[in-house]
Each structure stands twice: as C-alpha cells, then as structure tokens.
Image (spheres, coloured by chain):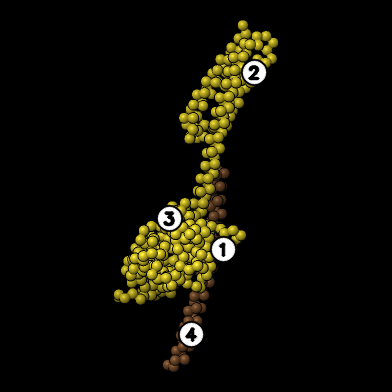
Chain colours: A brown, B yellow
Amino acid sequence: MSEKAEQEKKAEKRAEKLKKAEKRAEKLKKQRESLAKEMLLESKRLKKIIYSQGKK
Amino acid sequence: MNIMPLLFAIVLVAFAIFGLVSLILACCFLKTLSQRVSDFWTKLVSKLIKFPSILASIFGTYAATHKEEWLPTAIAGALSAFLWEIVESLVDHQTKKTNALAADALSRAEQQSRLRTNLLVVFRKAVDDKTKRIQKQANAAKQQVRVEHIRNALAPNPYIEELLNGLAVFFREQHSAPGGQTRNIRVGVYVNQDGVMKPIQSLSLNDSCSEPFSSYNTHQPAFQVNASGNRALIVSCILEKRMLIVDDCVESAKAGAFFFFREEQKGYLRSMATYFLGKVAQENGKMVEGVLAVDTDAPGFFKEADRDSLEFSFREFAARLKLELALNALLASKRGRS
C-alpha cells in the first residue's frame, strides 16, 4: 500500500472517530437536557407531596 | 368596712403569685417553653388576669368613699399585670424563636429532599439506559446468547461516561447561576497507575468535545503520589484518604493552600472537591486507589459547611462507579488473560 493511501486511510479513520465523538457528545447533551427536565419535574412533584400532605 | 377592696386584693395577690410561679417555671424550661405552652392560651390567660387589675384601678380612682382602701388592691393589680406582661412577652419571644428555627429546618429539609430526589432521578435514568441496552441485545440474540451479546449489553464504558454526565448535571442543578448563566462542571476519575494519578475518564459540561484535565499531560510530576512541593489536589486526596474541598481556589491559592498550574486556570477553576474512592478495578483487573474529582467555574460552589451532604452524594456515585469499573475489568476485551 502506498504511503498516500495509508495517510488517506488514517485521515478517514480520524474523521470517523471525530464523527463518533461528536455523535456521542450530542447524545450526552440530550441526556443532560432530559435529566435537568426530569429533575425539575420531580422537584415540583416533591413540593406537591410535601405541601399537599400538610393540608390534609 | 368595705369588703370589695379586700376581696379584689386577695384575688389579685393570688394572680400575682401565680404569675411569679409561671415566670419562674418559664425561666426553668426556657428551651422547651414553646413546645410546653401555647402562645394563644398564655395571651388569653394574661388578658383575663389583667382585667381585674384594671377594674381595681378604676374602682380605686372613682370610689366615692374609703378611697385609701383601694390603694393596696391597685398595687396588687399593678404587680399582677406587670408579672403577666413579662410571662406573655417571654412566651411570645420563645415562640417566635422556635418558629424561625422551624422555618430554617424546613428550608434545609426541602433542600435535602430535593437533592436526594435528584440523585434518584440520575440513577433511575442510568438503570433505564442499561435496561434499554440489555433489551436490545436480548432481541438481537433471539436464538443463542453469545458472550459478545452480554459484553455489548453490559460493557460499562458508556455507562461510566453517562454516570459522570449525570453527576455533573446533578451538581449543576443544585446551584443556579445568576442571570440564568450556565455553570460549567468538570468531572474526572483518577486512578493510581504505577505511582501516578492518571485520569481515566473525564468530561466537561460546557465543552463535550475537548479533553478536560489536561494538566496531567503538561504537569505530570505534580500528579506523582510521592510528589514533593506543589502537588495536585488529587494526590493530596489519595494521601489523606478523605474528601478534600476547596471553597474558592483563587482565595486558597492566595493563602498558599492551593496552586494553579497555569494562569488561565484561574478563569475556569474556582471551586473543587475531590472524593477518595478507595480501591477500584483497572481494565487489567488490578485493584488500585482512585479519586473522583469535580470542579466548577463558580467560586464557593463546594463549601466546607456542606461536607456531610456532599459526602452523601459522592458516596452514592462512588458505589455505582466502582461497580461499573469492576464490570469493565471483567468484560474488557483487551484484557491480557483468557
């Protein structure tokens, strides 16, 4: 295999790796947003539990 | 002789003695006063007792004859009213104090329950993700379950990353930055590899693509367990085997208790906590000591006053992290043994 072809293959691999990392980062970002939303929702539920129980 | 002043005097002296006894008892049980005595009933009794005192003063003032006979009665009334005013004020003060303490305790209880709920959310999400992956592999292996199916389902690398991601979100959600600005949180797991504290997993909330904790590459001598002089906080943590908290890195650096590797670190490294993980499994199965490090760009984010609460959260994450690292050691395909 020529040196050029080898370099091209390496560059391809690097690009693929970068793409994977970007995809992963995107997934983690989505996970963060979903987690933050869920935490907010659960906090609201918690307040409801604390205060509605007190009213009974 | 008019019997009315005498009768009034006897009643008012009795009230005054009752007031004095109540005052002595209130002083003896000052700390638990608001639990023992109702604020409402004290006020009611006090007002009822003050009424005959006022009556005695009126009678004394407007009596047509034997005015001087009302003088001792009026004095007894004044004494009774004075003592009951003190009892009332004391109970009122103690009730207000107890209410303020209760409000403070409620606020702390709310904060702690929110913290624990957020922890449960993070761990529930982690279990959900794992369940999805296992189900996916179970569907793929309808006929025959192979080792690679199990490995694909349980391989912990994505879980560790997601767990650290969850940890970062968990901390960020505890503190809201002014003006809706997003605080950055960086999380890293370090292990003792041949006497050097090496980061094996790390992430930064605001910068997903770059590799945080680059100081390890540029200042490796400071990460050696036997480093003399300026050493990384991670190393101090592994040597002291306990959680270390730096409230404000810049202030600590001024006091000589912390140091920055580079000047630009002062911009993004403002508060830091390192948690001693104890023994964790490396990919090759070797057990080594590890540290979980979290830092942020918000000064005062981690506080010594929050140590117990922080320890609780770190302990929960550490237990799951250690499990995933142990699974990693079991399932890592690159392991040197068969």
Q: Distance between the residues labelled 2 and 1?
A: 69 Å
Do residues under tags 3 and 2 come within 8 Å of each other at their CB atoms? no
Q: What residue type is labelled 2?
A: Ser
Asked if one can make out residue B301 in the rendered structure from this viewpoint, the answer is no
Q: Quadrant of residue B310?
A: bottom left
- Residue labelled with disc 4: A11
Q: Is residue B285 above or below residue B249?
A: below
Side (left or right) of B157 relative to B68: left
Q: Distance between the residues labelled 3 and 2?
A: 65 Å
Closer to the camera in the image, B33 or B152: B33
Residue on which disc 1 sits: B182
User: What's the amino acid at mark 1?
Assistant: Thr
Q: Mark 3 points at which residue?
A: B311
**CA–CA distance in space, label 1 to label 4:** 35 Å
Considering only vertical position in the picture, is B256 above or below B48?
Answer: below
Label 3 neighbour load within 10 Å: few <14, some 14-19, many 20+: some
Element assignment for label 3: helix
Between B160 and B217, the residue placed more toward the observer is B217
